[in-house]
Amino acid sequence: MSFTSNIKNEISSIEYSDSEKMAELSAIMNIGVKIYKDRFEIYSENISVARRIYKLIKETYHIDIDMDTSGVNSLRKNKLVLLIVREKYDFILNDLGILNNNIREFVPPSYLIDEDKDKQAYLRGAFMMCGSINDPKTSRYHLEFVISNEETANMINNLLNEMYFNSKVIKRDKNYMVYIKEAEKISDFIKMINATQSLFYYEDIRIYRDHKNMTNRLNNCEQANVDKSLASSSEQLELISRLKEIYDFDLLDDKIKTICIYKEKYPESSMSELAEIISSETEKPITKSCINHRFRKIKEMLKY
């Protein structure tokens, strides 16, 4: 079972206030309803979501609802659950802001989402119908809503950004995709819709991945420093070799000679390590900066 299915199964069983149920149902209907002259229908590929919709309509409007589980999605080969409402269908559509004087509306009336908890409920309903979140074990973090109507897509995007989720909307084929890329924002969204167990799973994987990425970055940084040190050592040894070819080594300044002797004796040492070795063996303190200065002097000598 996918991560998205686990989330939808989890949030489909939570109880909320009457106003939250209305907001959630309004989103579900806005995105998923098909309206006919004598009925409306809603499809769902998730049986838990279908049961949720059935329960919300049943408890709110006290009507009979037909359920058909014989359908199959021809592309995904998943079972489709079809809910058919004939009784009070026009009243329900108007009550939920889907119709207004027989005109199709794609933005809910303000009274349905005037409080933060109702806005959250609306987003929860939208996610049940058209939302998905990548499993955090995959290579990227991604949450999206795939919506057929541009006005609805922009409204969902505005609701998300009103709550600081930093979402964006783009056109994809015939639909519109509202999406969130930031791992932390996706975590906040899962928390907002009260998918607690899914949140624990998501955070466990995210923490592990972040720790692994940090370890890899540190290892890469350490390797880069090692490579840099080796390249520097190789260059210093080359300078010493050229110096001996051009000058009489015995006649050179003692400070220059000391650096050359110890670098050839400890060829893989960094300048910090070389400073410690020389200070220890000669009992004459010397710093990394001083060694660097002497190698610069050798470079200047080789220019002439």
Image: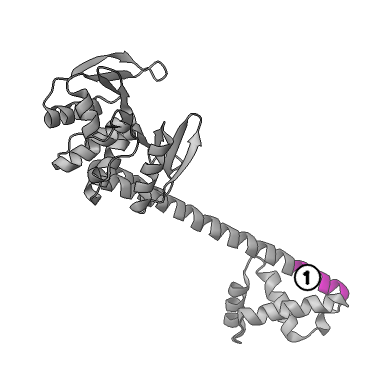
Position of residue 149 in the picture relative to residue 190 (left or right): right
Please identify the quarter of the rendering in which residue 135 is found.
top left
Position of residue 55 in the picture relative to residue 33 (left or right): left
Q: Position of residue 276 (x, y in %)?
A: 57, 77
Neighbour tally class for label 1: few under 14, some 14-19, many 20 plus, Cα within 10 Å:
some
Snapshot colouring? one colour
Please identify the quarter of the rendering in which residue 131 is found.
top left
Q: Position of residue 101 (x, y in %)?
A: 28, 31
Does the magenta run of residues contain 266?
no
**Secondary structure mostly taken by the magenta-highlighted segment of the chain:** helix
Provide the residue span drawn in magenta: 237-246
The image shows residue 301, relative to residue 208, as above or below, that is below
Q: Secondary structure at mark 1?
A: helix
Residue 144 visible (yes or no): no
- Determine the residue positioned at 32% across, 47% down: 189
Residue extending furthest front?
A: 101
- Determine the residue positioned at 67% across, 79% down: 291
Q: Position of residue 18 (x, y in %)?
A: 14, 40
The image shows residue 83, relative to residue 189, as above or below, that is above
Label 1: which residue?
239
Does the magenta run of residues contain 245?
yes
Q: Position of residue 1 (x, y in %)?
A: 31, 28
Residue extending furthest top?
A: 70
- Determine the residue positioned at 42% across, 18% down: 75
Looking at the rendering, in which quadrant would you find the C terminus?
Answer: bottom right
Front position in the image: 63 or 296: 63
Front position in the image: 150 or 43: 150
Position of residue 290 in the picture relative to residue 140 (left or right): right
Residue type, mark 1 in image: Leu
Total marks shown come to: 1
Residue 132 visible (yes or no): yes
Please identify the quarter of the rendering in which residue 48 is found.
top left
